[in-house]
Image: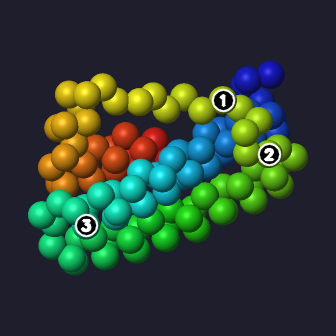
């Protein structure tokens, strides 16, 4: 069953995982847009991140539509994204590290 490239269930699960990552990216990037306004971050990276957040919204919408085209729905499969401990959260207070970590951990798999 897993070897069949036409298996709709496998395709649906894969697309669901990608869409879930896009939804998580929306949350992560939009939080950064808000938090960075209180940090010592110049306005141009904040605006760039706001634009990237909008891209994630479009990606999530497309992913949702593709999941539905396969007969699925968002939430049908569990998300596997974990939280960060206190030390990791402090490390991510650096804007460059924060954005880099988000791009590698969320956008990379998508």
Q: Is residue 12 above or below residue 25?
A: above
Q: Which mark is residue 78?
A: 1
Residue at image location 82% in from the left, 39% down from the top = 8
Counting residues from the start of the chain, the first of labels 3 and 1 encountered is: 3
Q: Is residue 90 left or right of residue 110?
A: left
Check the picture and name the quadrant holding the N terminus.
top right
Across and down, in percent, residue 88 comes to: 24, 31
Give the class, few, some or many, for how many residues have Cα within 10 Å of label 2's Cα (few <14, many ≥20). Answer: some
Across and down, in percent, residue 95 comes to: 19, 55
Residue at image location 34% in from the left, 30% down from the top = 84
Label 2 SS: loop
The span from disc 2 to disc 1 (Cα, nearest Å) is 12 Å
Counting residues from the start of the chain, the first of labels 2 and 1 encountered is: 2
Counting residues from the start of the chain, the first of labels 3 and 2 encountered is: 3
The image quarter in which residue 92 lies? top left
Q: Which residue is mark 3?
A: 37
Viewer-proximal residue among 78 and 59: 78
Across and down, in percent, residue 24 comes to: 51, 47
Residue that protrudes farthest toward the left in the picture: 40
Q: Is residue 1 above or below residue 11?
A: above
Q: Is residue 9 above or below residue 103?
A: above
Q: Which residue is mark 2?
A: 73
Residue that protrudes farthest toward the front in the picture: 38
Q: Is residue 11 visible?
A: no
Across and down, in percent, residue 107 comes to: 42, 49
Residue at image location 66% in from the left, 55% down from the top = 63
Label 3 SS: loop
């Amino acid at each position: 069953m897993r070897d069949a490239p036409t298996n709709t269930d496998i395709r649906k699960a894969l697309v669901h995982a990608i869409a879930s990552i896009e939804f998580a990216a929306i949350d992560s990037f939009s939080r950064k847009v808000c938090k960075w306004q209180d940090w010592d971050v110049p306005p141009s990276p904040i605006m760039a991140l706001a634009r990237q957040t909008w891209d994630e919204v479009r990606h999530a919408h497309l992913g949702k539509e593709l999941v539905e085209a396969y007969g699925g729905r968002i939430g049908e499969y569990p998300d596997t994204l974990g939280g960060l401990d206190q030390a990791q959260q402090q490390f991510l207070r650096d804007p460059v590290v924060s954005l880099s970590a988000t791009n590698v951990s969320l956008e990379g798999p998508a």
